[in-house]
Image: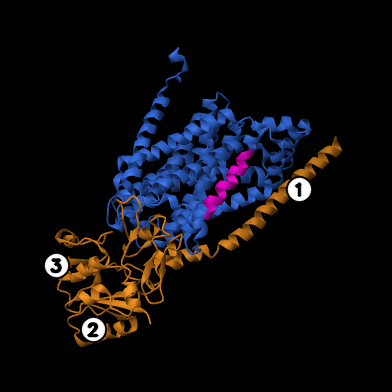
Chain colours: A orange, B blue
Amino acid sequence: MSKAILYDSTMCIGCKACEGACAERWHLPYGDKVAAEQRLSAHKLTAIQTFGEHFSRRLCMHCAEPTCASVCPVGALHKTSLGPVVYDAKKCMGCRYCMTACPFQVPAYEWNSRLPKVRKCDMCYDRQRAGRLTACAEACPTGATTCGDRDALIAEARRRLAAKPGDYYQRIYGLQEVGGTSVLYLSAVPFEQIGLRTNLPQQPLPQLTWRVLEALPNVVSVGSVLLGGVWWITNRRDDVARAEGGKKR
Amino acid sequence: MNGRTLPRFTIWRAVFAVLMVAGAYATYLRVRYGLGGVTNLSDQFPWGIWIAFDILCGVGLAAGGFTLVAVVHIFNIHRYKPILRPAILTAFLGYVLVVLALMFDLGRPDRIWHPLIMWNPHSVMFEVAWCVTLYTTVLALEFAPAVFEKLGWHKPLDWLKFISVPLMIVGVLLSTLHQSSLGSLYLIVPHKLYGLWYTPLLPVFFYLSSICMGLAMTIFESWHSSRAFGRDLELPLAAGLARVLAVLLMTLLFVRFLDLGERGMLGLLRVNRTETWLFGLEILLLAVPMVLLFRRRVRWNPSKLYGCAVMVLFGFITNRLNVAITGMEAGSGTHYVPRWTEVAVTLAIIALGFAIFRVVAQYFPIFDAHHENEARAAQPVREAADERVPAGVG
């Protein structure tokens, strides 16, 4: 069973308890200054954002087919069967392709470190493996952030949409975006109004590059035969010309 | 007394010295304060000019190596042989400098070797890393004969000759793969890259344009070396390359616009945005030399030919910068302007390239390789005759 997080913007009161719990879990400094930042960064792996009277929460989306894991040349990122997308800092060489490629602009970099790492939410992989809730879900006083099996959370989200149709924009963000994510959103207003990207395809992005990479063995085999053939023909033509030239002489 | 031992002062040497000092200081800052201390990169915009120029343009500009190897040794068009070795040297130097630039850009340059043992075949970057590593090795082997000739080592020379054909085929294949893959890198950001540049054909465009860059670079570098070393420009050869270049440019521009039309993006050209103007600049810098190079008078005039080659180079540099920077800004929701230290490192690397090329060309048989080969051949007369025969047959 794959784990997921459901964030219900209509229930969020913007108390930022999730931010504090997250910082504590990662041993990152957290004070008024950090709390005021509305953007993910190497020292803030989840952020509450304000859009008028609505709140939104940013964190790694833990895609079903993560773009970051597909683009990483050294395989430092991978999707666990439990659901979280985790990062192995020991492999990372800092090319930052994951940051360029992530459709949700999540991975952050320790720009000012001499031995920098990528930083992002790992959905409390260690806690979840031990059967515990994520730190943010545990800290949330209103139940705006809940954590559990993805299928169960989708069912719960549908129940809420049906129970109070007037309170919700009738869609679940994360159900199909880039092939589905393990973080799901409910909102009172269309998702672009709470800062979520809505121009994403429903297909997982890794397919776009895999389609090309898949063809490489063919390019190599056809290419080498072709180039070898061209060489053989042109070389042979020169040999023949040389032999004929010799006869004439 | 002291004045005699100092190198002669010229304006270019002064420029070189300034660039080296600035580059060295920027390097110190990079090592001391990390990427954040010397670049304007951010979480929103993680790739700057070190990727856009040093890597994307650098690899493209080094494409003359594989292009001319294919022309001379695979298609066996021997008359281009005199400009083959300079092209291979340019390519080899180009790749070494690309790797050097990568050492600045990688967050952990000490782990540059990681892709060789930690595999992810789903990653375009992984494929590029392998191809660049292998191809740099191939270029070293393709350039090695110049060194061995200089040193008079005939045994390894014969050995290299024995493996030369498969080696060259492998080199052309590796180049095809990674030149196109630099375009494939951006296939995964359809939501970020502006419509004028995002297309499923990115790998094809990057590949075709790399051949154009390689040809333009070969013309550029023959013109410069003819001046630096007081030799005649191999005008018939440069003009021949220029003709191919014109045809390739036409094909490329035609397919570019066909693709824009097919994807319904031509309307973007009427929008008054930075992207539109920089796209216009890119197209102008390619279309103007294309039209000019179709004229024989331009192709056979050294300075006009040189001017066209420079325009083509700037056209494709604009293209790469547009893909990696201009086209990515809006989608990333931010602006990026490089910091002086980023520019200093880039300029120092370019200057280093020019300087090393000059020194190597001076001390190794690069330009007169052709004649030396003939002198070493058992039957010099027959070898010379060979050159003319295919032309007569074809």
Q: Which residue is mark 1?
A: A236
Foreground pick, A130 / B310: A130
- Whether residue B301 is visible here, answered yes or no, is no
How far separated are the C-alphas under marks 2 and 1?
Answer: 75 Å
Helix, strand or loop under label 3: loop
- State whether the magenta stretch is mostly helix, strand or loop: helix
Q: Chain of mark 3?
A: A
Mark 2 — residue?
A: A161
Other residues around mark 2 within 10 Å, as few (<14) / some (14–19) / many (≥20): some
Q: Quadrant of the N terminus of chain B?
A: top left
Which quadrant would the C terminus of chain B be assigned to in this image? top right
User: How many numbered marks appear?
Assistant: 3
In the rendered structure, does residue B30 fall within the stretch colored magenta? no
The reply to the same-chain question for discs 3 and 1 is yes
Q: Are discs 3 and 2 located on one and the same chain?
A: yes
Callout 3: few (<14), some (14-19), or many (20+) C-alpha neighbours within 10 Å? few
Q: Residue A52: which disc?
A: 3
Q: Does residue A115 show up?
A: yes
- Describe the element under mark 1 as helix, strand or loop: helix
Q: Residue at x 43, y 67 (%)?
A: A206
Coordinates of residue B139 in the picture (x, y in percent): 58, 44
Disc 3 marks which amino acid?
Gly
Question: Which residue occupies 34% across, 83% down?
Answer: A151
Dot 3 or dot 2: first in sequence order is 3
Q: Earlier in the sequence, mark 2 or mark 1?
A: 2
- Residue B133, numbered circle: none
Residue B240 image-quadrant placement: top right
Q: Position of residue B116 (x, y in %)?
A: 52, 56
Residue B389 position by quadrant? top right
**Foreground: disc 2 or disc 1:** 2
Residues in magenta? B130-144
